[in-house]
Structure formats: C-alpha cells, structure tokens
Amino acid sequence: MVTLPPALLFWLVVHPFASFWRQLGAGWTHSLVWPIIILGMAALFTQRGWLLRVEYGTRAMLVFAGAVLIGLSGWMLVRLRRHLTLAIQMGMPELSPSGAQRLLTQGIYGRIRHPRYVQMEIGLLGWALIANYLAGYLLFLASVPAVYLVVLLEERELRDRFGRTYDQYCRRVPRFFPRRSQEPPPEP
C-alpha cells in the first residue's frame, strides 16, 4: 500500500528517459529519484488511516483464494530469482552506460516476457483478497494499467537496446500469459 505506487514511479521515470539516465549513470539516477520515491512512501504512510478506513472483514474463501495466489506468486518469485540479480532488479542494466549485454530469455522468461510484473500483480491481488480492504482492491486496480504502461515503456527501451533480437523474442514469447502448449525456446 505504501511502497508499490512510489516504486512503480521509479520505472515510469526511468524507462521513458533511459538514455538520459544512462548518461548520468546508476549512482546519480538512484540518488536523484529515490529521495522523491521515499517522500511518496512517507506521504502514503501518513495517510494510511484514511486509506484503510473501509474494511470488509475476514472471509474464509477470500483468504483461501488469496493464499493460493500468494503461493503462486512465491513460486514465481523463486523461479525469477534464478535469473534476476539484485543489480537487475535495481535497474543497473538500464542505467549502465553500455546497457545490458544480454537479453533474459531463459527459464520463466522463455514462457512469458514480463514474469516479474505478473508475479507482482498476482501477489498484490492475493494480498488484497486476504486483507479485504477497499484500498487493497483499488491499489490492485490502479496498478494494472500502471504496470501495463511500465511494460510498454520497458519494451520500447528493450527494442532500442536489442533491436531485431528483441523483436524475434516478442514473436516467440507472449507478454503476460503463457501459451497452453509451447515448444521450449531454442538455447542461445
């Protein structure tokens, strides 16, 4: 509730202006952007009482469904961690002067192009179902178009960096939902 909206702001600021931030470097980018994000988190924290005032109570079926979604999100996170280092999660490839040297296409990235965002949305919906607050549902609903915008900006930036290789990857691997039957991607 407090961290997600400002954290999404980081990517909404970085991806459209990746070449500018890349010239400044990761250190300057993080030094300039994160204080603003932390202020946003602090502002949301001070408003938490107002944001969480509408509660719908505990519902066993919602708790069960939420737990299943959080379990799925956790399973995906374990699979993601095999490919995502902390540096990648912090945007270092996007912010380094040379950019990323390699496109992630292995493992879960061979099934869907944006598993990190899918995993986050599944976990957020699971949390909203368990907590059963209006604010949780609103946050989930607001995060879907925000994440979609981040994905579009990220894809534009990846296409600029990887060109034809990324276009071929996009034709082979769906954006969010894996195909029912899919041949394993060729090894690079």
Image (tube, rainbow, N blue to C red):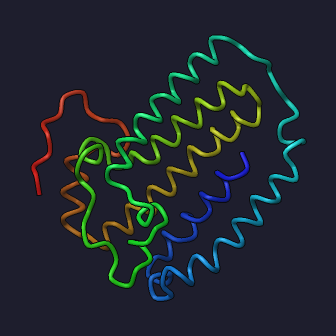
User: In the rendered view, does 6 fall on the left or right side of 68?
Assistant: right
Q: Answer with left or right where residue 119 lies relative to residue 133.
A: left
In the rendered view, would you say 120 is above or below 61?
A: below
For the point 64% across and 51% down, which residue is it? 4
User: Looking at the image, which residue sits at the far top?
Assistant: 60
> 43 above or below 25?
above
Residue 4 position (above or below residue 55) = below
Residue 28 percent across, percent down from the top left: 57, 84
Observer-nearest residue: 146 or 33? 33
The picture quadrant where one finds residue 140 is top right
Residue 14: x and y in percent read 52, 71
The residue shown at (31%, 67%) is 159
Quarter of the view holding residue 133: top right
Quadrant of the image containing the N terminus: top right
Q: Which residue is at a point 51% across and 43% down the rendered structure image? A: 120
Total residue callouts: 0
Q: Is residue 170 above or below residue 55?
A: below
Can you give x and y, in whole percent of width and height, for residue 34 in the image? Answer: 65, 71
Find residue 149 and report its horizontal and vertical position in percent.
51, 55
Task: Determine which quarter of the picture holds residue 84.
Answer: bottom left
Residue at x 75% of width, y 58% of height: 41
Picture quarter with the C terminus = bottom left
In the foreground, 33 or 88: 88
